[in-house]
Image (cartoon, rainbow, N blue to C red):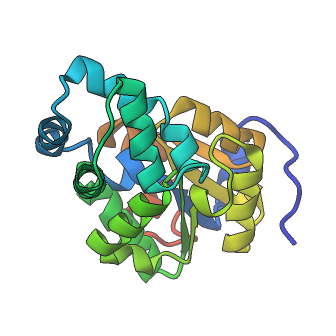
Amino acid sequence: MVEAPTTGSNPTEADTRAKIQAVLFDYGMVLSGPADAAAWSRMLAITGLGDEQFRPAYWEPRHAYDRGTFTGAEYWRAAGRYAGVEFSDRQVQALLAEDTALWTQPNPPMIEWAARLQSAGTRTGILSNLGDEMTAGVLRRMPWLAGFYHRTFSHTLKLAKPEVEIYHHAAAGLGTAPGHILFVDDRADNCAGALAAGMQVIPYTGQPEFEQEMERRGWGGLWQTGRLDADRS
């Protein structure tokens, strides 16, 4: 059984050395790169909307999609309603494909680190807010995701970050107590949720900053080799 969280803040550096037993990754903007501008332009062309009308319609129902309240098709119809238009079945299918293309630009340094961790036998997991069609599309386009020990996609649980229960689910899937999991996410609210669940957290604000923080916390060896005992004295 995964032990209950006991703290809402990161342990001291002296306490964290050698305690990481698994690394839990967000997918979007951590393992994947920024949104593909070309895919966004294609979505604008499919909808016939301008950016100022399309952007809020894209984001307003997104959390409900990620949480499994909407299927992919339902999400796009809700986005259309928000923008004051009705998308045809053909438009919906095209938008589903381009939405996947939007979020499948790889982030090589973090993908390569995940591979080092896996080669060293360190457990890796994914905890991502993704809807059903996005999950299917991402898995098709990113076959290396099969190498992760456990994957939690929000729509399957009818939960989404930063709800604390979803972090507990990911920890149970990794077979690791939350306090021994390093969680990496680009969003401050998702990082706060992980802290509330008792995990150790590094916000991903950029590659240089991430590597510097790993070094600062004494985990440079874990970054370089992926081995859990790399930083043990």
- At 83% from the left and 66% from the top, the residue drawn is 2
- At 50% from the left and 56% from the top, the residue drawn is 71
Res. 9 visible in picture: yes
- At 88% from the left and 46% from the top, the residue drawn is 6
Q: Is residue 122 left or right of residue 7?
A: left
Question: Relative to residue 225, is residue 59 depicted above or below?
Answer: above
Q: Looking at the image, which is closer to me, 152 or 1?
A: 152
Q: Is residue 6 left or right of residue 54?
A: right
In percent of width and height, residue 69 lies at 61, 49
Looking at this rendering, what residue extends furthest in the top direction?
52
Q: Is residue 206 left or right of residue 25?
A: left
Instruction: Locate the C terminus by quadrant.
Output: bottom right
Res. 233 visible in picture: no
- At 75% from the left and 45% from the top, the residue drawn is 164
In percent of width and height, residue 153 lies at 55, 61
In percent of width and height, residue 7 lies at 83, 40
Question: Relative to residue 13, is residue 178 depicted above or below?
Answer: below
Q: Looking at the image, which is closer to me, 168 or 66?
A: 66
